[in-house]
Image (spheres, rainbow, N blue to C red):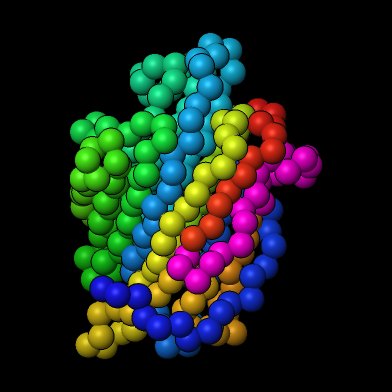
Amino acid sequence: MTPAAASGTTNITNATSYNWTGYRLKGTDPNHIYYTSVAGNWSVPYFDPPNNSVQESASQWVGIGSGDTGWDQLIQAGTVAYTGPGWNGIGPSGTYGFYESYPLQSEVIIQNLPVNSGDVAGASVSYIARSNTMIWVVCSSSANNTCVSGTEALGSTVGTYAEQAEWIMERHSVNGLNTLLLPFVRADYYGATYKEWRGGSTVSDTYILNQGPTGPGLTLDNIAMVDCGGTPTLASTGSLDSQGNFSTFSYHQGTAC
């Protein structure tokens, strides 16, 4: 579906996080009920040679929901570049695609999708409220621009309010501590788009990030990743253009905290 024509721009608020950088859209405008799909593409950063003593990571993904409670799952899909001792039995360094419903499940590695540093990768996540189901798609240029997709029912005891949408780079948490941020120079994001459910017979409307409708309960956060004491800034995100493109830059690795 072609994104709808611009109907306004949302005031952008600066925010900070100990493990996220990117954009977060919170709330919905008065004409819509929830976010039903988010999508975007990005360049996968290169990772350092393996370091057996220090874990570093940079996970890029799109998502819906906050992940704050079981009834507001964060459903997400994307790619990971990492180096260090490794986790999940996948070795000391590498790249892979994943999907997740947090905090319901741990990250699930997509085994049949090759991902490499320097790839143009992308993902979309959709939420189907009538069946309480997530649909994920992850693509990579290493797979000749083909995609892997899947469907997962969230079950009878969890769901998502789907009133938050994200386009994020994250440093992982391992054993309760944030890992160091994987060093990279620049990571470009392309075509940040989303769909909102209008209700009734209309399925959804598609918009480019920051070119969609506005409303009093709607905010768009530009998130800078800071170390756990609040300084220094580890990574920050540049401004959005009219096509939903932006870049993310790293400055420090931070501490495991």
Give me the residue at 31% from left, 84% from top.
199
Q: Position of residue 164 (x, y in %)?
A: 48, 65
Locate residue 23: give its quadrant: bottom right
Range of magenta residues? 224-244
Q: Which quarter shows the C terminus?
A: top right
In the picture provided, is 201 more to the left or to the right than 96? left
Q: Is 71 placed above or below 112 here?
A: below
The outermost residue toward the top is: 52
Q: Main secondary structure of the magenta part?
A: loop
Residue at 25% across / 85% down in the picture? 202
Image position of 104 (left or right of 169):
left
The x and y percentages for residue 25 are 52, 67
Residue depicted at 29% across the width and 41% down the height: 141
Q: Is residue 160 visible?
A: no
For the point 44% across and 20% down, the residue is: 93
> In the picture, which quadrant includes the N terminus?
bottom left
Left/right of residue 104 with respect to residue 237 in the rendered view: left
Residue 163 vs 20, above or below: the answer is: below
Q: Measuring from the top left, give residue 5's x and y in whole percent.
A: 40, 83
194 in magenta = no
Q: Is residue 125 visible?
A: yes
At which x and y percent is residue 254?
Answer: 69, 32
Residue 230 falls within the magenta-colored stretch: yes
